[in-house]
Each structure stands twice: as structure tokens, then as C-alpha cells.
Amino acid sequence: MEASMRSELTPTNQRQTRRNPAWNGLVAFGAASLLALMAGSAIAAEPTAIPVTDSTFKCLGEMTKVRHFFVDNLNGDTKATIAVAEKGSGDYPVGSVVQLIPGEAMVKQPKGFNAATRDWEFFELDVAKEGSTIRKRGFVDVVNRFGGNCFACHVKARPEFDMVCELEHGCDPIPITRRMLAAVQKSDPRCAMPAMTEDDQQALKELDEVLKTMTMPAAAPKQGT
Ligand code: HEC
């Protein structure tokens, strides 16, 4: 398990980035924080993954809500993450966590992990009262429980939006309304007191109907060169 997670987190474009002098500076900088994080167990020349485990994820209500979604930062740089989210465009800082619903999350890994996803790692979670369990994680090949490939949809956001879809960033629309999303957010079982109203219950019923017929792209589009 650990070994497979490791290989998944190995940068794909490492050889190429090693030749870039600017990158060497970043690596040197990263190596210092890496030592602090991992007590010297990793290879210093590689960008180190921000460790993400089941316990990384929490009740959405404990994150910061910006418009209709939730953000956090695993490096403690929450202010910078909120600033990009509020601005609505630009690159999210390393460590950013973005969630729309309890069961799906994006985490920004350090530069060099995956050029295609702009270093976003996609997660699908099982959530329960007891907490979160990571069902799937990865970069271009994570498929959600509805058969949709995260990357295939999110890559369609225009470059200035850093893979964040919202409603008008260029992603194909999903048939799930903001009202339904709000109800799903409130039903997060990890939160101490989910505050569901009757209208939320109704919205969840409508969502069930939508999910019965919803189709999603299962594979990432062919990447250009
Ligand atoms: C069918 C296309 C599609 C798939 C598949 C998909 N998403 Fe999204 N996602 C969207 C759209 C569209 C939105 C914006 C919805 C809105 O704002 O109402 C969104 C919103 C989000 C957001 C909130 C930030 C944003 O981009 O607006 C996160 C986080 C997210 N998705 C993560 C994931 C993860 C993780 C997966 C896979 C496990 C995934 N998504 C699969 C289309 C998709």
C-alpha cells in the first residue's frame, strides 16, 4: 500500500525539471522543509509530497467557505488560499485543499508533481461520522463514484482558473444545482451537527433522481503535446 502510494506520488517530469537551474533553487529550498517534515527519510532532490492521509480531511464546516465551496491549506497558508478563492482566478498556493462536497477533494502538491493537473492531486473519500477514508487518489486517472474522471472535467477550466470549474470557467456543466450542493454540504456526516432543513431534504431527493441518469466522462481527454 505504502509502496504504491509512493510511486503514484513520484514526479513525472523530474528528469526534465532537474536540468532547469531555477528549479534547483526551489529544490534546495524544498529540501529544508522536507527534512523538517520527514526527518530525512526522503531523497532530497525530489519535490516532497505534502502528506495526505484519512485524518487530513475534516467536516466541511471547519474549513473556510468561499462563495459555495470550502478551502483550507495544509501548510498553514490558509490566507493565501482564501485570497485566490475570493479573487476567483490565479494559481492556488501549495498545500491548498478545495472541496465542493464531502466526498471529493483537490489538494495542491508542490510544483513538479504533475504538470498535466498543475500539481493538483484528486481525492475521492468515503465519509462517515467517524471520519474520512481515502478511496482513491491520484492525478489524471481518478474516477469518482459516478464514473466521472476528475481531471477530464476539471482540465477544461480556462488556464487562469487553475482547474477550478465553478460555473463559468469553461468546464462542462454538471446537472447538480447549487441548491442540491448546499444540501449535500449540510449533510456532511463528519460534522457534529448537520443542519438540514426540509428544503434540504427535498433537494437531496431531487439529487437522487438526477444521479440515476447522470453520465460523466470516464477518461481524460487526449493530452496535447
Ligand atoms: C462531470 C465533470 C466533473 C467530474 C467528473 C468531477 N468534477 Fe469536480 N466539478 C465539476 C464542476 C462543473 C464543478 C463546479 C460546480 C459548481 O460550482 O456548481 C466542480 C467543482 C469541484 C470542486 C470545487 C471547486 C471547483 O472546481 O469549482 C472540487 C474541489 C471538485 N469539483 C473536485 C472534484 C474531484 C476530486 C473529482 C473526482 C473525484 C471531481 N471533482 C470530478 C465537474 C466535475
Image (cartoon, rainbow, N blue to C red):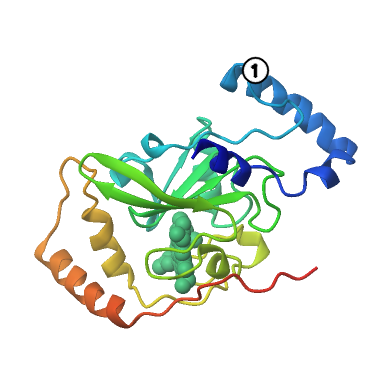
Image quarter of residue 199: bottom left
Q: Quadrant of the C terminus?
A: bottom right
Q: Is residue 167 visible?
A: no
Note whether 197 is above or below 24 in the view shown: below
| Count of picture labels | 1
Which residue lies at the image location 85% right of the left edge and 47% below the top edge? Answer: 16
- Pick the residue in front: 28 or 8: 8
Left or right of 135, for residue 20? right
- Pick the residue in front: 182 or 111: 111
Q: Residue furthest bottom?
A: 213
Which residue lies at the image location 82% right of the left edge and 37% below the top edge? Answer: 23
- Pick the residue in front: 219 or 26: 219
Q: Position of residue 17 (x, y in %)?
A: 82, 43
Which residue lies at the image location 89% right of the left edge and 36% below the top edge? Answer: 21
Q: Position of residue 19 (x, y in %)?
A: 90, 41
Q: Which residue is mark 1?
A: 40
Image quarter of residue 216: bottom left
Note whether 130 is above or below 177 in the view shown: above
Which residue lies at the image location 49% right of the left edge and 40% below the top edge? Answer: 1
Q: Position of residue 219 (x, y in %)?
A: 56, 72
